[in-house]
């Protein structure tokens, strides 16, 4: 883990699961500027096969096939070492039903694309603060 030189607080190790290279680059750059250590993977099955236990946060780009996304969230939540890692879904899908399914499957938050990087950073900080208190 790293420390934020501005306020001496611990910043986290984040995983971005997205097949969109532009998303990966923009989000990664934004979080690295804030002192986070960021890793990227391209596909959701990669997320399931990866050792996720050392991450403090997972940002998951929700696929067009919502069944795959829901299945991935459920698999992550059923893995004991990953069950409590905060997970934030990034998605173009704005239907309430899909948002509710993702949250019910175990996502901690859901942000609809397009979104502001400032808002994303603020949501991640809030989720991590809550997780660290928990």
Image: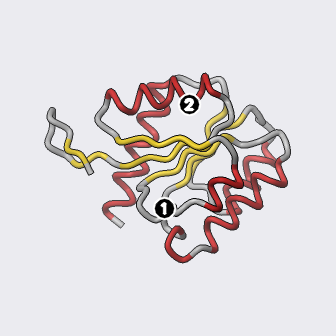
Element on which disc 1 rests = loop
Occupied quadrant, residue 64: top right
Element on which disc 2 rests = helix
Q: Is residue 82 above or below residue 89?
A: below
C-alpha separation, residue under disc 1 versus residue under disc 2: 20 Å
Q: Position of residue 124 (x, y in %)?
A: 44, 42
Q: Is residue 96 above or below residue 103?
A: above
Do tag 1 and tag 2 residues touch (Cβ < 8 Å)?
no
Occupied quadrant, residue 106: bottom right
- The residue that disc 2 covers is 24
Residue for point 54% across, 70% down: 83
- The residue that disc 1 covers is 85
Q: Position of residue 32 (x, y in %)?
A: 36, 32
Identify the residue at the far bottom of this view. 80
Q: Is residue 26 above or below residue 127?
A: above
* The C terminus: image quadrant: bottom left
Q: Which sits in the foreground, 44 or 126?
A: 44
| Horizontal arrangement in the rendering, residue 93 relative to residue 108 (left or right) | right
Q: Position of residue 7 (x, y in %)?
A: 15, 38
Residue for point 71% across, 55% down: 45
Residue for point 62% across, 55% down: 47
Q: Residues within 10 Å of mark 1 (few under 14, many from 20)?
A: many
- Mark closer to the observer (1, 2): 2
| Horizontal arrangement in the rendering, residue 33 relative to residue 78 (left or right) | left
Q: Earlier in the sequence, mark 1 or mark 2?
A: 2
């Amino acid at each position: 883990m790293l420390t934020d030189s501005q306020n001496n607080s611990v910043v986290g190790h984040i995983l971005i699961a997205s097949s969109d290279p532009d998303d990966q680059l923009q989000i990664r750059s934004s979080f690295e500027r804030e002192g986070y250590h960021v890793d990227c993977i391209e596909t959701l099955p990669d997320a399931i096969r990866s050792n996720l236990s050392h991450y403090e946060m997972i940002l998951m780009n929700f696929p067009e096939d919502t069944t795959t996304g829901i299945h991935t969230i459920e698999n992550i939540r059923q893995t004991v070492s990953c069950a409590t890692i905060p997970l934030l879904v990034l998605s173009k899908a704005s239907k309430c039903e899909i948002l509710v399914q993702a949250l019910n499957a175990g996502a901690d938050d859901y942000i609809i694309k397009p979104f502001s990087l400032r808002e994303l950073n603020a949501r991640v900080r809030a989720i991590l603060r809550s997780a660290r208190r928990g």
